[in-house]
Amino acid sequence: MTPPSTNTHATLHLISGVFLTLMVLLPSSTIAAQNKAAEAAYEGAAGLVQLQLWDKAAKGYLEYFEKFPKHEMAGHAHHGLGLCHFNLKDYTAAARELKAAANSRGRSLPNPVEVNLLLGQALMKKEPADFGDAEEAFETSLESLGFSKSGIIIRSWDEQNVKKWLGKNKDT
């Protein structure tokens, strides 16, 4: 009987060979079934959002993340979970999920305008409010629409600009 090799390189080579063999032998139907299960879990939670069953939808999204944390719809799921928390008035949790949605990467991404508008609102409503990050979220939303801070919209609401706006809108 031959003693086991102490050569680390040979051991790693053997392990990688076994792994590749298993990957080839693993039926693609298993992967497809897993993807279908992930899509079903996501769609189930999204359907509860459509019915405005915020608490149940939030639980559905949490189960989805528990089972499929890296699924291609994860960005959309963070958006949906953020919307649930927002409607349940848990603005801190909403901001956390909406930031994750805004920063998500992948093939399927949520609408950056919607995500950042809701994120800005959540940041202003949470305790303590975070007006600086809220403004940044609103700016990102405008940039997604093709507007810039120095564009057609006055974006600075300091005392001077508020008085200017009030003066223009005095009689309206």
Image (spheres, rainbow, N blue to C red):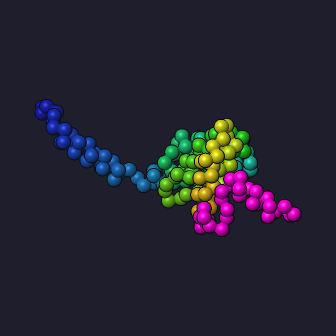
Is 11 positioned to the left or the right of 57 in the image? Answer: left
At x 49%, y 56%, the residue is 106
At x 53%, y 59%, the residue is 108
SS majority, magenta:
loop
Image position, residue 139 (x, y; %) = 61, 57
Image position, residue 39 (x, y; %) = 57, 52
**Number of dots carrying numbers:** 0
Position of the C terminus by quadrant:
bottom right
Chain part drawn in magenta: 145-172
Position of the N terminus by quadrant:
top left
Residue at the front extreme of this rendering: 160
- Residue 57, relative to residue 106: is it above or below? above
At x 45%, y 50%, the residue is 30
**Residue 162 inside the magenta-drawn segment:** yes
Image position, residue 133 (x, y; %) = 59, 48
Instruction: Compare residues 29 and 80 and report the one nearer the observer.
Output: 80
Instruction: Compare residues 27 and 40 and report the one nearer the observer.
Output: 40
- Residue 98, relative to residue 11: is it above or below? below
Is residue 94 visible to the viewer in this orientation of the structure? no
- Residue 166, relative to residue 77: is it above or below? below
**Residue 114 inside the magenta-drawn segment:** no
Is 147 positioned to the left or the right of 159 in the image? Answer: left
Residue at the left extreme of this rendering: 2
Is residue 128 visible to the viewer in this orientation of the structure? yes
Image position, residue 69 (x, y; %) = 51, 45
Instruction: Compare residues 10 and 85 and report the one nearer the observer.
Output: 85
